Amino acid sequence: MIIKGKNYRTVWMEGKVVRMINQPLLPHRFEIVDLYDTIEVHDSIKNMIVRGAPAIGATAAYAMAQAALKYDGSDLAELKKDLRAAYDFLSKARPTAQDLFDGLDYVYNVIVSDRSIDKIKKKAIDLAEDYAENSIEACEKIGEYGSTLIKDGFRILTHCNAGALATVDYGTALAPIRTAHYAGKKIFVYADETRPRSQGSRLTAFELVSEGIPHAIIADNAAGYFMKRKEIDMVIVGSDRTAMNGDVCNKIGTYEKALLAYENKIPFYVAIPLTTIDRNCPNGEAIPIEERSDEEVLYAYGWNDSGKFERVRIAPEKSRGRNPAFDVTPAKYVTGLITPKGIIKANKKEIERLL
Ligand code: MRU
């Protein structure tokens, strides 16, 4: 993605350092964070410095490579013990996005059987880079297929941020939107603000501004109003984990958008790289849902008019909150899954064929 005239990825690696865009500072400040070890990378995922399923997956792959590269001893068994410890620790960073486990496995499962320390290091970094490249390629394909659904003049609703910042580059739900825009189609995007972390108003809007795509940020509870007035032609969202029966788990609030779309006969598409599909998950009931600190609900933060960062409480001192980060949308509300291999129905038969 182009930011301030320079091409960036959301996460990448230089030497033994994992580098990433500091997402909580956006859209007000653009900074890169450097992470030097497994603990720092784990915390960056947990605290959502990097977020979005495919971006988390690539970060995990780089973290495994970093753990291998940082080993400076000569004991193969010790290196393998370090790698296993890094794998276990990183896999606890966040529970819902399947890509976290996919990224870890992509590197770990190959290097763990090697018998040379040098080869493990070389393979680890090659695999992590490979993972990031594959992720970008998949997003571009999603863009190509998904854009065929977008007609000139379409008004599209999206929830959360499933753009370049949620991936290594290009995005999943925003990929068809980008591709349609590049093809000269006149489109308009409604971006749900996506409380409590506001990925829609902070990140999706940031990307849409950068691309010059006409849009409006709407309050989370406004989508029904626009759908009923026939001001939304389609919905495209991402997925953090896709079950084998086509149920999709995405940012909290996605489920109610799907119900609204269904009621108003508006197509509801979910853009997914194959890395979000959990082969061991029969349906959405089996997906672990992260519940985050209630502080995210009870406080808001941003930049005040004097350009200073401020966190303000927006609820009574004595109130507590609940903060599930994701919900499951049953497959029956999903018009189709936009994948890097084409658009399919959200059901077991088509997902199995795809895999
Ligand atoms: O909590 P987040 O910001 O990591 O949640 C992100 C989402 O829910 C995205 O929609 C999802 O990861 C798909 S991203 C391409």
Image: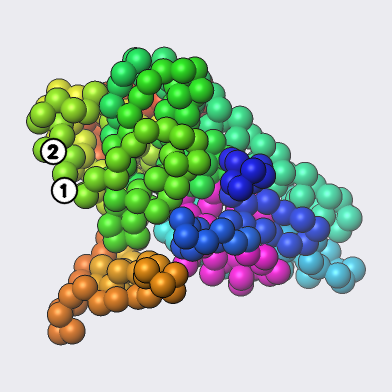
User: On residue 224, which mark appears?
Assistant: 2
Taking the view exactly as shown, the residue that stands out farthest to the front is 306
Q: Nearer the viewer, residue 238 or 216?
A: 216
Q: How is the image coloured?
A: rainbow
| Left or right placement of residue 92 versus residue 63 in this view | left
Q: Is residue 54 magenta?
A: yes
Choose between 162 and 76: the one closer to the eye. Answer: 162
Q: Are marks 1 and 2 in contact (CB under 8 Å)?
A: yes
Toward which corner of the image does residue 324 lie, by quadrant? bottom left
Q: Which residue is mark 1?
A: 221
Q: Nearer the viewer, residue 102 or 10?
A: 10
Gap between marks 1 and 2 measured at Cα:
7 Å
First to last magenta residue range: 33-62
* Amino acid type, mark 2: Gly
Is residue 189 shown left or right of residue 276? Answer: left
Asked whether residue 100 appears in the rendered view, the answer is yes
Q: Is residue 319 left or right of residue 9?
A: left
Give SS at disc 1. Answer: loop
